[in-house]
Image (cartoon, rainbow, N blue to C red):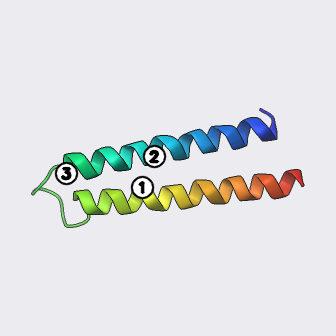
Amino acid sequence: MTLDERIKKHRKTIEDIEEDIEWLKKSQFAINSGTKPNGYDNEYLIKRQNENIIMYKGFITELQNEGA
C-alpha cells in the first residue's frame, strides 16, 4: 500500500467514525445499558470515538511527515 493510499484509508476511517458519532447522538445507544459500570453509556462512546479521530489524525500527520 502506498503512502497516499494509507492516508486516504485513514481519512475514510475518520469519515466513518464521524458518521457513527452522529448516529450515536441521535440514537442514545449504549452498550448493555444498566448492566455495565459507568463508562459504556452514549456520552462515553462518543468521547471514545472522538479520541479515535484524534488518533487517526495523528497517523495522517506522521504519514505526511514521512512522505515530506
Side of 8 where 16 appears, left or right:
left
Q: Amino acid at mark 1?
A: Gln
Q: 28 or 35: which is nearer to us?
A: 28
Q: Residue at x 42, y 55 (%)?
A: 49
Q: Is residue 19 above or below residue 56?
A: above
Would residue 40 be seen by someone viewing this image from the given angle?
no
Q: Residue 58 falls in which quadrant of the image?
A: bottom right
Q: Are marks 2 and 1 in contact (CB under 8 Å)?
A: yes
The type of residue carrying mark 2 is Ile
Contact flag, marks 3 and 2 (Cβ < 8 Å): no
Residue 56, horizontal then vertical, whole percent: 59, 53
Left or right of residue 42: residue 20: right
The residue at the far left in this view is: 34
**Quarter that holds the C terminus:** bottom right
As helix, strand or loop, the secondary structure at mark 3 comes to loop
Label 2: how many residues lie within 10 Å, few (<14), some (14-19) or many (20+)?
A: some
On-image quarter of the N terminus: top right
Q: Position of residue 5 (x, y in %)?
A: 74, 35
Which image quarter: residue 39? bottom left
Q: Which residue sits at x=80%, y=41%? A: 3
Residue identifier under label 1: 49
Q: Which residue is mark 3?
A: 28
Disc 2 designates what residue? Answer: 17
Residue type at numbered disc 3: Gln
